[in-house]
Image: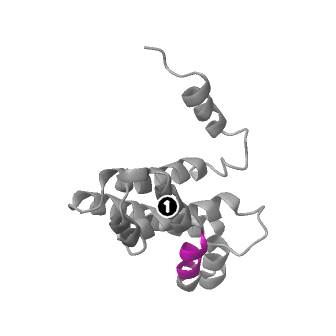
Amino acid sequence: MEEYMKVAVQSSGYIMVALTSLVRMGNLVTIEDFDWISRAKIVRASAIVTRPMDDMAGYGFEKKIDAVKCYIKEKGASKEEAFDELQTQVSKAWKDINQECLHPTAISMPTLMRIINSASVIHLLYKDGDGYTNSKSEIKELIKYVLVEPVTV
């Protein structure tokens, strides 16, 4: 499981998404921000949030090796025990993200918020199953409320 997570966190695409999301920020992002993102604890923690959540959401219908299957095979655990362990890892990663936000940093606030918001969106998409793949989920309603029927003031 530990070996899988080391590879999965790096190959999940989250770090690449975080990097490419900075490109369109123009003057708000600096070269230091790009250097920082490749070694930042908050970015790694965000990737740890996203990988297990995606694996749990896709468990049962995606035909690939994932964290759930690795944990079940390694520990001889049930699906529920594997999910509990992965939820614990996600919670610990959120604690790391929050802890990193408490410390002053030379990184610009827009860059930091981009990382946090990306992890939050992934968490929202996968918290009750695969909201990205399943368009009949609560996510469809949330998007409608934000983009189609905005609150009038």
Determine the residue positioned at 61% across, 64% down: 80
The answer to whether residue 113 is visible is no
Nearest the eye: 21 or 79? 21
Query: Which residue in the protein does label 1 denote?
Result: 18
- Using residue 85 as the reference point, say whether residue 80 is left or right of it: right
Nearest the eye: 81 or 35? 35
Q: What's the residue type where badge 1 is placed?
A: Ala
Q: In the rendered view, would you say 111 is above or below 83?
A: above
The answer to whether residue 119 is visible is yes
Q: In the rendered view, would you say 146 is above or below 49?
A: above
| Magenta range | 5-12
Q: Is residue 8 magenta?
A: yes
The quarter holding residue 33 reads bottom left
The quarter holding residue 77 reads bottom right
| Residue with the most extreme top position | 153
- Colour mode of the rendering: one colour
Nearest the eye: 134 or 10? 10
Mark 1 surroundings: few (<14), some (14-19) or many (≥20) residues within 10 A? many
Nearest the eye: 24 or 40? 24
